Image (cartoon, helix red, strand yellow):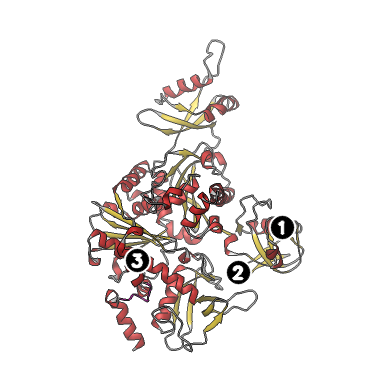
Amino acid sequence: MTISLTSDETIPAREGETLYISLKKAGVYLVASCGGKGACGKCRVKVLEGGHEALSYGKLTAREKEEGMVLACRTVPKGDVLVDIPKESRLVVGDKIAIAKTRDLVQYLTSYGVAINPPIKRVSLELPPPTISDNISDLERMRRALEGKGLGNMRFSHAFVASMGRTLRNAGWKADLTYVPGSGVTGEAIFISSAGYCSRRYGICVDIGTTTVVVYLVDLLNGEILDIGSTYNSQMRYGDDVITRVVYATEGGGLHELRDAVLADINTIIRSLMERHEVEVCEVDSATIAGNTIMEHLFWGLDPGSIREEPYIPALNVFPMWKGGTAKLAINPQAPVYTVPSIASYVGGDIVAGVLASKMHRKPEIALFMDIGTNGEIVIGNNEWLMTAACSAGPCFEGSGIRCGMRATAGAIEAVKIDPATCEPEVSVIGGGVPMGICGSGMIDAISEMFLTGVVDLKGKFIAGKTDRIRKGEDGPEFVFYRGDGHLHKDVVLSEVDIENLLRAKAAIYAGITTLLGEAGFPLDSIEKVYIAGGFGNYINVERAITLGMLPDMPRERFVYMGNTSITGAYLCLLSEELRKEAEEVGLSMTYIELSVSRNFMDEYMSALFLPHTDLGQFPTVAAMMKKTRG
């Protein structure tokens, strides 16, 4: 008995075993925050062929049932079945693409001139058992032992003391104490275990994006990344952008729903990674969180309402070192959780982490840092000054809101070339195989190629009769990049509606750059380096992004790909106290410009809504290419 997937994977299945279990055994993970109990309703899949028994449907709607949608954790195949897994249901664990891009992070950490120095330390203790003559309390006995190790004046929380006595006795008074160092000899005890138990030390770093969530499982002793997991941020069902979610959290009373949604995503990934590597909960004793200001507020359950109202002030920018239990993370509840500090309402810890990862704050050259995602954040400056701003680009470059859009994972079209004579496309797919959709870099390539070959005009509208690849779709005219078989494999297209969304996003990004440069009083040619960050930053073709009018027309050697700098910065902060302090200094040194009150921003935005721009003088190399390709 087998389970065939539309992604061309074939998986063995045992009689009586649910789809969820069979897929999991084969390394195909689904989002299931309830652990596969049928309660969360997230492991939705569609059974296209084959007999099966749905034990229950949970939260599925009547329409979803009619379309063949089932819960994988509550469905048992009765023979060979063909299953389609929606992109939002798949949890990417063991992401070989992400690992390939980050395999040298330990070396990168050492390039900062710092040693591995996580926020927690561990000390082994052997206490004399109490007797009639040595009858001090358990806590005083602990204090005495710590003073002998040079760790006097330790602080002890109620949660620590509540389990301390039983643990010490079960351990025969030989125990390992995990603590957070403080100033001088002062620190806080966070966890105690029997000597040798929970001996391994792991940490997690999390990038909470508006559209996606990424988690690293890290060995705190050597900095090695054991594994990576990622998925879509389930908050998307409450709104694609941060403002919609803020409105839902405040006016809709949904703050806790939003928090629970993203926590469920993070914890599903954490549990999957821990299970793969047989890691105990108590062994994960440190965590770092990075995200934009609103994502960090929602993660901690803090009201973000004041962020969207003038003067746009968050509840806090610098977060206390709260604990895993307070965060509701599936790790040691006493583990310290460091949140990378935010700058202002719409520039958060993800950008502080990104600047830290780029090292632009350490160099004298004037650089431009761009994080291209749902929110387009921009930083300009050097080791003497930093200026930042944010613009709402929308989630389209990360696959959301685009009919065939998906993240830059296996199965996504990442690059496109179009023959100028025949208008036939040639596509490159991440991981090879059959295309399942198109990611941000593929969209940039596609629109740029269609523009240069005359398939679309300056406004992004299709030119009728140019090629039979243009057809009428359910959302209007569309271009077919891959023709599926109509059953197992779907067509991959971009419609005029998709292109319109992408043009709005690129216009916001370019307008943000030009407006911030104007505020700083620097011409474009003063920028010596451009750091490109974001979920698809390792795949983007700079030439095509310039053709699109998203990136400034500058010498190509000035551009540097950085990939997901938010998770890189979170990794650096997880492993180094010195870099945590440096991140806080970066945050304090940034001057924030609020584009929503800038008179120039809207003018720049309207001018950038065309391919590549209304002023071709800003894109001389694109003008030259247009002349060459169009005669």
Mark 2 or mark 3: name the one nearer the start of the chain.
2
Tell me where residue 364 appears, x and y as whole percent: 22, 55
Q: Residue furthest top?
A: 133
Q: Main secondary structure of the magenta part?
A: loop
Tell me where residue 551 appears, x and y as whole percent: 34, 68
Mark 1 or mark 3: name the one nearer the start of the chain.
1
Where, quadrant-wise, is the N terminus in this rendering? bottom right
Whether residues under marks 2 and 1 lie with C-beta atoms below 8 angstroms apart, the answer is no
Residue 161 located within the stretch drawn in magenta: no
What residue would you read off at disc 1? 57
Q: Which residues are magenta?
A: 609-614
What residue would you read off at disc 3? 602
Q: CA distance from mark 2 to mark 1?
A: 24 Å
User: Can the viewer see residue 405 in this picture?
Assistant: yes
Q: Circle 3 sits in a helix, a strand or a loop, which is it?
A: helix
Q: Which-is-in-front pick, marks 2 and 1?
A: 1
**Amino acid at circle 1:** Tyr
Tell me where residue 520 appears, x and y as whole percent: 25, 59
User: Can the viewer see residue 214 in this picture?
Assistant: no
**Amino acid at circle 3:** Met
Q: CA distance from mark 1 to mark 3?
A: 48 Å
What residue would you read off at disc 2? 7
From this view, report whether residue 186 is shown above or below residue 376: above
